[in-house]
Amino acid sequence: MTNWQRFVETFFKPEMLRQYWPSIAHGVLVTVEIAAAVVVTGLLLGLLLASLRAYRWQAVNVLIVIFVDVFRALPPLVAILLIYFGLPGVGINLPSFVVLWLVLSLVLAAFAEEIFWAGITSTAKGQWEAARSTGLSFSQTLAFVVMPQAIRLGVPPLTNRTIAITKNTALGTVIGVGEILNQATAAQSFSGNATPLMMGAVAYVLLFVPVVVVGRWIETRFAWRRA
Amino acid sequence: MRLIPSAGGGCNSDAAGMAILVVSGLRKSFGSTEVLKGIDLSIAERELVFIIGPSGSGKSTLLRCLNRLEEPSRGSVTFDGVEVTARGTDLNALRRSMGMVFQSFNLYPHMTALGNVTLALRRVLRKPRREAEALGRNALAGVGLADKALSYPSELSGGQQQRVAIARALALDPKIVLFDEPTSALDPELVGSVLAVMRDLKRRGMTMLVVSHELRFAREAADRVVFIDEGRIVEEGSADTIFSAPRERRTKAFVAQLMR
């Protein structure tokens, strides 16, 4: 057997491709579902927290800052293991995909809050004054004048962060969420062949390259004419 | 409310009606620095009052205390029979009838000119979209920008932006407009278009309080000029009196500098 044949046998074995593509495809579906849920929950929660913080209620702000700092500092894998293996001890059993969704959403929310908050604080003071001088309330000014600008400012860093967090769905494999990597490693251990892992890698690339491209498009589109 | 006599020497007394804005004993401190040291001022309906003074004299702070964008430390402001400085005053309701125009325009960059003008109509006055847009287009036409309704601020010149800002204030049908150095951020050739709008407003009987150093406009349109220095009103009177024959030494010095 030549080296080339050995390489093909290891990473692209035709029988393996045929046998395991359905389970990898299923993994892709699970990954997409969880990633979409994480993006929606994380961004909305981040937006909510940044908005709350704008009211500058001391106690609330302290809690928000603690939450944000903890979830930015903690490796997501540690949080996943802690919750998945810890909570049953106090009688709370969460399905593994719920744990994965929850942890990644909280991590994304923590980063998104910081990004939105930076946008709020960098919106010119004159914007607040102009809006308030026409009779808009604080909340209306936040919702209609400041937040739209803060969100635009936040789009480029948020795009990067969102891609980084959604790739972390691969961490679900350690608690048995049937996403791409989990399907691939299971198949690899049954077959003793690396082809399923290569299929997983290809699946990730096919899945995330379009996301990265769309992200770049969003970034240029929102990199924006400021008055 | 009380009638005020034609305030200051040599005013256009025909312009003065009932006092609509009365400021008394107004003080404002930032930390240990007292910026306003007791301002007494009364503005009549349809009057155009100019406020001049060196930078840091408290002119802008005075303006911003009137609608409580800045919280006054002491003293009172009464506007159209409502005590602005009272604890329970509905500030959002009050601010609808006190328009404000800023030195740096402060247009909302993510909205078109029409969006800027209609935001408060829709969200504060709760007008339906169609009615708000009709009023908004009307207000833009009033400042000569009917054709720029769908332009974004970044697509407009400084003078056009400031006129949109004026339209934004006027769309709410205010009883007074406060102008905070409306032409200071403009290139000289764009100042004229903004002053033309203000001149037109004056002609239509709008009550206006203007912080500005546009001497020629003051001479032509102001019913009264108030000179403020170090947080106090030093002297007030007609534009002619203040610019040509000021009594106070500080006024003389400041006016001489302006004329240079």
Image (cartoon, coloured by chain):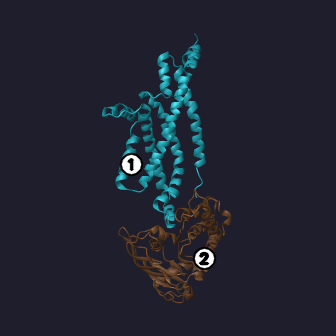
Chain colours: A cyan, B brown
Quadrant of the drawing holding the C terminus of chain B: bottom right
- Of residues A138 and A217, the one nearer the viewer is A138
Task: Check whether the beta carbons of the residues at disc 2 and disc 1 lie within 8 A of each other.
Answer: no
**What is the three-letter code of the residue carrying label 1?**
Ile
> Looking at the picture, how far across and down is residue B186, in whole percent?
59, 68
Q: Locate residue B198 relative to residue B1 in the image: left or right.
A: right
Q: Which residue is identified by label 2?
A: B201
Q: Quadrant of residue B170?
A: bottom right
Q: Which mark is residue A30?
A: none
Q: Residue at x 48, y 69 (%)?
A: B93
Q: Which residue is drawn at 59% across and 36% down?
A: A210
* Residue A68 appears in the figure: yes
**What is the three-letter code of the residue carrying label 2?**
Leu
Report helix, strand or loop for mark 2.
helix
Chain bearing tag 2 is: B
Q: Looking at this rendering, what residue extends furthest in the right direction? A: B147
Q: Looking at this rendering, what residue extends furthest in the front direction? A: B128
- Of residues A12 and B76, the one nearer the viewer is B76
Quadrant of the drawing holding the N terminus of chain B: bottom left
Q: Which residue is identified by label 1?
A: A64
